Amino acid sequence: MRVVGSRATGMIAVCRILCILLVGAWRFGIRAESAPSAADRSTYLSEIARVLQTDWPKNRTVTIVCHGHSVPAGYFKTPEVRSLDAYPHLLRVALAERYPHAVINVIVTAIGGENSEGGAGRFETDVIALKPDILTIDYALNDRGIGLERARIAWAAMIEQAIASGTKVICLTPTPDLASKISDPTDPLNQHAQQIRQLVALYRVGLVDSLAPFRAAAEKGTDLSTLMSQGNHPNRRGHELVAQALVDWFR
C-alpha cells in the first residue's frame, strides 16, 4: 500500500508540473512542437528603429533604461566610476552615429552592489516611471549571492512588469569574474547565464549574451585580464564588446 501511495503521489506531482508547463506554454504562445526562443533580432526593435529614423518635427525622444549593478553603473576599479567608458554611454554614442537625427535618452538606474531582488524592489518607481522604450537588465554577477531560484523570481517579475508596460526588454548575461571558471558549465556564473537565456526564451524578449564574446576571446588565447579593470569589472575594451552586442539589435 505504501508503494501504491507513493506512486500515486508521484503521479499527482507529475500532473501538476505538466499543467504548469501547459499553462505557461499557452500564456506565452509557445507551440508544443517547437522549443521557445529569444525575440527575433531582425524585427524585435524595428518599430523603435523607425522612430529613430524619423526626422523633426515628427520625431520624439527614445528612452533607453539600463538597470542593474556596478557594471552598467560604470564602476571600473572600485571606487573609480568611468560612466563614459561603460556600455550604456557607448551604446548612446553608437546610436547617435547610426541615427544622427534622433533624440536618444539613455538613463542608468544601476546601483553598485545591488542584486536583482533589490532591482525588482524599486522597479516600479525607478524604471517603469520613466516609461522606457527599451530596458536592459544586468544583474547576474551579483545574483550569485542570492542563488538561482531567488534570482529567477526577481528577473521574471521585472520582465513581466516591463512587458505589461509596453517596454522592449533586453536581458544581459554576466560579464566575467576572473575568479570564476568561465569554461565550466557548473560554475555559478555560467549557471546564472544559462538561466537568463532560458528566461529570455520563455518571455521571448531580447538577449545580449555578454559572457559569450569573453569566453570566445579566452578560447582564442586572450588573457581575460586585458579586458578587465579589476576582477569583476570590465575595462573599456570589455564594455565595448557588450555595447556592440546591444547595437546589433538595432536594424
Image: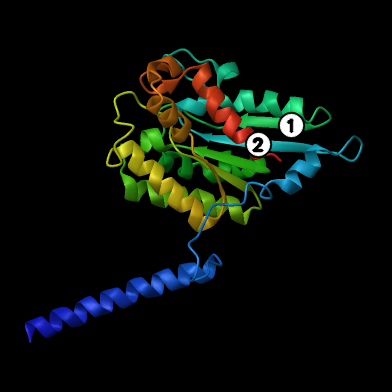
Circle nearer the N terminus (1, 2): 2
Figure check: 67 above or below 202: above
Q: Is residue 41 visible?
A: yes
Q: Is residue 108 visible?
A: no
Can you identify the residue that label 1 sits on?
A: 104
Q: Decide if residue 103 is on the left or right side of residue 26.
A: right
Report the amino acid beneath label 1.
Ile
- Image spot of residue 15 (x, y percent): 32, 77
Q: Nearer the viewer, residue 147 or 181?
A: 181
- Image spot of residue 173 (x, y percent): 45, 38
Quarter-wise, where is residue 9 in the image? bottom left
- Image spot of residue 85 (x, y percent): 57, 17
Q: Decide if residue 25 is on the left or right side of residue 219.
A: right
Circles 1 and 2: CB atoms closer than 8 Å = yes
Q: Badge 1: how crowded within 10 Å, few (<14), some, or many (20+)?
A: some
Of all residues, the one furthest to the left in this rendering is 1
Quarter-wise, where is residue 180 in the image? top left
Of all residues, the one furthest to the right in this rendering is 57
Instruction: Identify which residue is drawn at 38% across, 23% down.
Output: 232
Q: Badge 2: how crowded within 10 Å, few (<14), some, or many (20+)?
A: many
Q: Nearer the viewer, residue 33 or 166?
A: 33
Quarter of the image with the C terminus is: top right
Report the amino acid beneath label 2.
Ile
- Image spot of residue 144 (x, y percent): 32, 37
Q: Judging from the image, what secondary structure is the residue with disc 2 in?
A: strand
Rendered image: mark on residue 45: none
Figure check: 197 above or below 55: below
Rendered image: mark on residue 64: 2
